[in-house]
Amino acid sequence: TRLLQRLVPVARTCPARADALRAAAPPVLLAGGLARGCPAATFAVEARSRNNDALGKHAALQALRGLVPFPHLAAPRQPQLLVLVEVFCGAAGLAVVPASEYH
């Protein structure tokens, strides 16, 4: 059969809307070490959207723009942490994981 089960890290879920994603992100970013007062780290945002026309990859990235404060720096080529956004149908999942452990 063509059945494939995929495990995706998710720390928090929310409806697949930009405003809901923006509201769900701060506690996840704090727990993942990307908040004010946490040691400086480089990060990248990886977003995937499947079976959803309302919140695409670009809209998910725009919803998270500006939520990670200084001294954390965006470094898409060599991040220490990945902010993962998985959108599937009407739900979105959000997590922060070490980049070395994800790929």
Image (tube, rainbow, N blue to C red):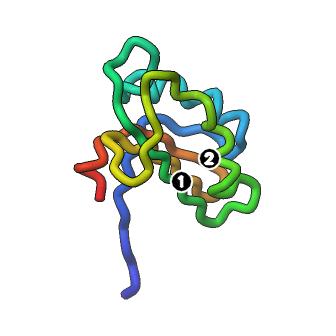
Residue 88 percent across, percent down from the top left: 58, 57
63 and 44: which one is in front?
A: 44
In this rendering, the answer to whether 56 lies above or below 21 is: below
In this rendering, the answer to whether 20 lies above or below 16 is: above
In this rendering, the answer to whether 5 lies above or below 85 is: below
Q: Which residue is labeled 2 in the image?
A: 61
Q: Amino acid at mark 1?
A: Ala
13 and 81: which one is in front?
A: 81
The crowding category of the residue bearing disc 2, from other C-alpha atoms within 10 Å (few below 14, some 14 to 19, many at least 20), is some
**Which type of secondary structure does the marked residue at label 2 adopt?**
helix
Q: Amino acid at mark 2?
A: Leu
Q: Residue at x 49, y 41 (%)?
A: 94
Q: Residue at x 39, y 78 (%)?
A: 3
Q: CA distance from mark 2 to mark 1?
A: 7 Å
The crowding category of the residue bearing disc 1, from other C-alpha atoms within 10 Å (few below 14, some 14 to 19, many at least 20), is some
Q: Which mark is residue 47?
A: 1
Residue contact at pointers 2 and 1, CB within 8 angstroms: yes
**Which type of secondary structure does the marked residue at label 1 adopt?**
strand
Residue 77 percent across, percent down from the top left: 39, 54
Residue 75 percent across, percent down from the top left: 42, 44
Q: Quadrant of residue 83?
A: top left
Residue 67 relative to residue 100: left or right: right
Quarter holding the C terminus is: bottom left
Q: Which mark is residue 38?
A: none
Quarter holding the N terminus is: bottom left
